[in-house]
Amino acid sequence: MAHISGAYITSAFLENTLVAIKRGVELANLPPEFFEALTRPQRILVVNIPVKMDNGKIQFFEGYRVQHCDVLGPFKGGVRFHPEVTLADDVALAMLMTLKNSLAGLPYGGAKGAVRVDPKKLSQRELEALARGYARAIAPLIGDVVDIPAPDVGTNAQIMAWMVDEYSKIAGRNTPAVFTSKPPELWGNPVREYSTGYGVAVATRETAKKLWGRLEGKTVAVQGIGNVGRWAAYWLGKMGAKVVAVSDINGVAYKKEGLDVELIYQNRTVPGPSLVELFVSKTGAEHIKDPEAVFAVETDILVPAAIENVIRGDNVGRVRARLVVEGANGPTTPEAEKMLYERGVVVVPDILANAGGVVMSYLEWVENLQWYIWDEEETRRRLETIMINNVSKVYARWEKEKEWTMRDAAIVTALERIYKAMKLRGWI
């Protein structure tokens, strides 16, 4: 349970996150008060955002901004629009951002934001009003050297454009560096659209090379074909892997011979049928109605790229892959990971595998602060270099500690940097 202002909040996702952090603290032989410090976010803002709906009525939406720890630098983390979001889950996500930023060597602390809403049920005008309302509500706590939000589940570059415009109105000047993952026309970088998925692909390639000598020819299944999953599938295909299955809420598209990942690129900006439906209708892929059937596909690599807690004790037995690379945040529960570890399955943890998004946000932030921009190829090269170095660092640590999981190695590495910074600053 996280300790907040004399009270405790909890959720399964938060409990799992704290279990992993506590294990990391113990493995690193760090003091108990350090773990206690990590269970207490530095600041939490809860807001209610009024939006005039298209029917003329006012509806209130609850939102959060959790600023977990800024010992390494300004707070950094996405904003999630989702109907099932909770404050406890937002705290867990902020904690993971603290670890992720530390592991990547970025000058950032961890934060996360959320609004409890189903964005698909809002009109474009209502969505814009909500985005601007959220930006106004959190404006006192953010800034380009204080807290820099970005997109997460249910948000995108357009929403960031509305938010940065609203914040700029409050500031009385253009403030591009206060939000990242903006459209290229508004101080963004074209790599940011696919950066998380690209980072997942790079992490997969580098791990596959260390485990098997190569990625080429290995089969891949991707659970969740949203922004992260689709670009992970696309780039894995371009890197020589064979993507045989992808899934969303409509089910699974499966083709033993491999799916044509060019279909992903060709439909990157086209609204309409889901990618699962497109693969079925245009490539003759088999349509399996059960979305969880993607776990049971005979494949070398599984990329869970949707939401948390999808690989659990009750379904982990279906997983056939030898390598699981976490594109989503917290998709594997501790119970399930233990069972995978006992079967010899390697899990590349979220704080390593899906860090491409925040690494790219950092690169965009640096550009914005300097009013400078790199081209797409140069940006992607910088992103790839950071991801390769991160995988090598964690893998080397893991090889030295055979009783550890790769998640243990990643978390310990991240925690040691945070602990040293706290000690140097006199926080503990």
Image (spheres, rainbow, N blue to C red):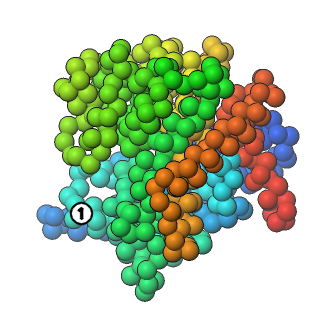
Residue beneath the point at 43% across and 80% down: 174
Instruction: Write down the quadrant of residue 162 in the picture.
Output: bottom left
* Residue 2 appears in view: no
| Closer to the camera in the image, 132 or 1 | 132
Quarter placement of the N terminus: top right
Q: Where is residue 187 in the image (x, y as percent from the top left)?
A: 43, 69
Query: Does residue 232 appear left or right of residue 265 in this picture?
Result: right
Mark 1 neighbour class, 10 Å CA radius: few under 14, some 14 to 19, many 20 or more: some
Residue beneath the point at 26% across and 48% down: 269
Residue beneath the point at 58% across and 23% down: 214
Callout 1 secondary element: helix
Q: Residue furthest bottom?
A: 172
Q: Where is residue 168 in the image (x, y as percent from the top left)?
A: 42, 79
Query: Does residue 46 appear left or right of residue 118 in this picture?
Result: right
- The residue tagged 1 is 126
Asked if residue 67 is positioned above or below residue 236 in the image, the reply reads below
Q: Where is residue 300 in the image (x, y as percent from the top left)?
A: 51, 18
Q: What amino acid is labelled 1 in the image?
A: Glu
Residue beneath the point at 33% across and 53% down: 117
